[in-house]
Image (spheres, rainbow, N blue to C red):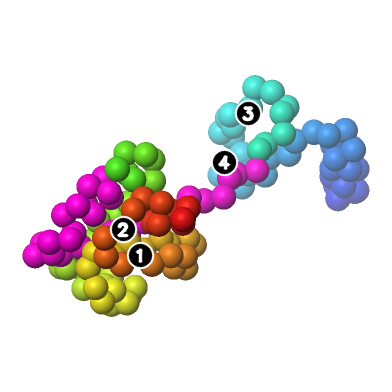
Amino acid sequence: MHRIAFNTLLLTCILSGSTWLCVNRTDANRPIPLPETNAPVSIPAKRQPIIYFFTRSDCVYCRPMRQLANQLHREGHTVYVVDESRQDLVRQYGVTAYPTFLVVNDRTIVRRVIGLTTKERVLGQR
């Protein structure tokens, strides 16, 4: 009998457009914040790629590229500076020359730029 009542209630709510929140038994007595409007939830945007900048302390060409990495960071890109002490990442991504920019999206290398470069090449705009 309870199952029939629950299914009827579920079908009524689905047809009326109500929103259901599923909680487990421990959360059942806690208040749940609801959105102020019944506006549909927007689909999240595609995740922004991560830019890894591989550098060495004795690399002459790495110095101007560090400024480029700082510029990309100021513009809102996620930039990680990796120096030669992180040999685990150097091996994982197969870095053999410095400076190297790697653009990684969902654990996949999308772009590899080695040496002196421009912002457009790192971002794939040229």
Q: Is residue 117 left or right of residue 40?
A: left
The amino acid beneath tag 3 is: Leu
Tell me if label 2 and label 1 are in contact, CB under 8 Å. Answer: yes
User: Which mark is in front, 3 or 4?
Assistant: 3
- Quarter of the figure with residue 102: bottom left
User: Which mark is in front, 2 or 3?
Assistant: 2
Sort mark 1 into few (<14), some (14-19) or many (20+) by Cα contacts within 10 Å: some
**Residue 55 is a magenta residue:** yes
Residue under circle 4? Answer: 27
Tell me if label 4 and label 1 are in contact, CB under 8 Å. Answer: no
Residue under circle 2? Answer: 117
**Real-space CA distance between mark 4 and mark 1, rounded to the nearest whole angstrom:** 49 Å
Residue under circle 3? Answer: 34
Q: Secondary structure at mark 1?
A: strand
Where residue 93 appears, as percent x and y from the top left, is 34, 73
Residue under circle 1? Answer: 113
Q: Earlier in the sequence, mark 4 or mark 2?
A: 4
